[in-house]
Amino acid sequence: MTSPGGSVKREKSDLDAYNRYLLQQIEELITNYGPLITIWNDVPQQFEGRGAQTIRLVRKLQPDILINDRTGDGGDYDTPEQHIGKYQHERPWETCMTICEQWSWKPNDHMKSLEECLRALVLCAGGDGNLLFNVGPMPTGEIEPRQVERLKEMGDWLAKNGESIYGARGGPWKPTHALASTRHGKTVYVHILRTETDRIELPDLPSKLASAALLNGDAIQFVRKDGRLALTVPDARRQPVDTIVKLQFEDSVMALPALAVSPEIRATASNVYRNETSAYGAQSAFDGDPATRWATDQGTKQAWIAAELGAPRTIQRVKIHEALPGRVQKFEFQYRDGDAWKTIFSGTTLSENFEQQFAPVTAREFRLNILEATDGPTISEIELQGAGSHE
């Protein structure tokens, strides 16, 4: 067993004794206070192997209960923590996230803005997952008033826009930083979270589109051409946090596979931390998830990460999010022209939110070439954007 913070391993522990205590507690909860919706375990890795006993007992006491994935022996759904899970429809998932920074209550803890809260809600729904939003009670057992107010604000928003969330599944387009979609029957809801243009382009769907309107019923323009669906929502008609477009199709859209909004990217890198490509590979810098990152070995002073697009694209802006700002000291941003890499622009330091616009460049491959670093560079996200991009 470890300390409450999980960083210090105790010299002595008796997991078998703890497991007996745990099973008695679970039996008391389900027997005296059930039926329950779920058993949400949160146990250390050392507990693996004993979790099967927990699952067997829970199923015996209440066969229809749900069990999360943290017993060390499976479970019914996944629980990404403090970040939005990726699109996943094969297995249920639920992001567990705090409304402030800590799980337990702390005076004057930084609280998420309404926009941050709603974005988390929409991106979870768009990824075909749920949001478990934590509020820690004060020593009195009450919820802090400002947190109550924030939840009420979210409730007010849902009262107006809930049809796009309640009972809806994620897709048919995978979420990005700027856009999510949900669906129910023949209806698709497009959640426009960020955009720099009136025009939103998406891969078209194989079903006739009967109508396109804002959630309040106001019709909007749409064009279907060359396998793309373009929606036009003027700035004056957009909402501050989330502009929702309701698309009505003639056939059900529920069985359609989720499509990537942007062309798929094949990422490569000169170095990956301990060769752990699944955790720190180059693809992590292009997955739309700021909680993942491309990382390099300790002591690495030079490295590159490249993106190969499915087809040539015109790019005129790049956003680079350095996971540990200050490590990169000199770099080039390049594109491939035949067998040669040509530099679009160069710079010194990056940052957590570096952004650079440049003259449009059409190419299939782009690369961040790091020439000098104080230690192993690590990048959480690289966003390649074209003219008026909504990515």
Image (cartoon, grey):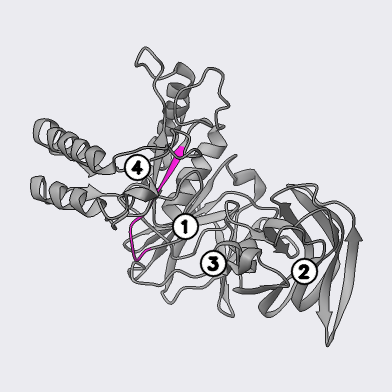
Q: Quadrant of the N terminus?
A: top left
Is residue 391 visible in the rendered image? The answer is no
Reading the image, the residue beneath label 2 is: 304
Q: Is residue 118 left or right of residue 328?
A: left
Most foreground residue, 148 or 155:
148
Measure how far apart labels 2 and 4 are at the Cα level.
38 Å
Residue 163 lies, with reference to residue 211, above or below; the image says: above
Q: Which residues are magenta?
A: 89-97
**Disc 3 or 2, which lies upstream in sequence?**
3
The spot of residue 167 in percent (x, y) is 31, 51
- Packing grade of label 1 (10 A; few <14, some 14-19, many >=20) is many
Reading the image, the residue beneath label 1 is: 181
Measure how far apart labels 1 and 3 are at the Cα level.
27 Å
* Mark nearer the viewer, 1 or 3: 3
Reading the image, the residue beneath label 4 is: 42
Measure how far apart labels 3 and 4 are at the Cα level.
24 Å
Under mark 3, the amino acid is Ser
**Disc 2 or 1, which lies upstream in sequence?**
1
Report the disc number at residue 278.
Answer: 3
Q: Secondary structure at mark 2?
A: strand
Most foreground residue, 13 or 215:
13
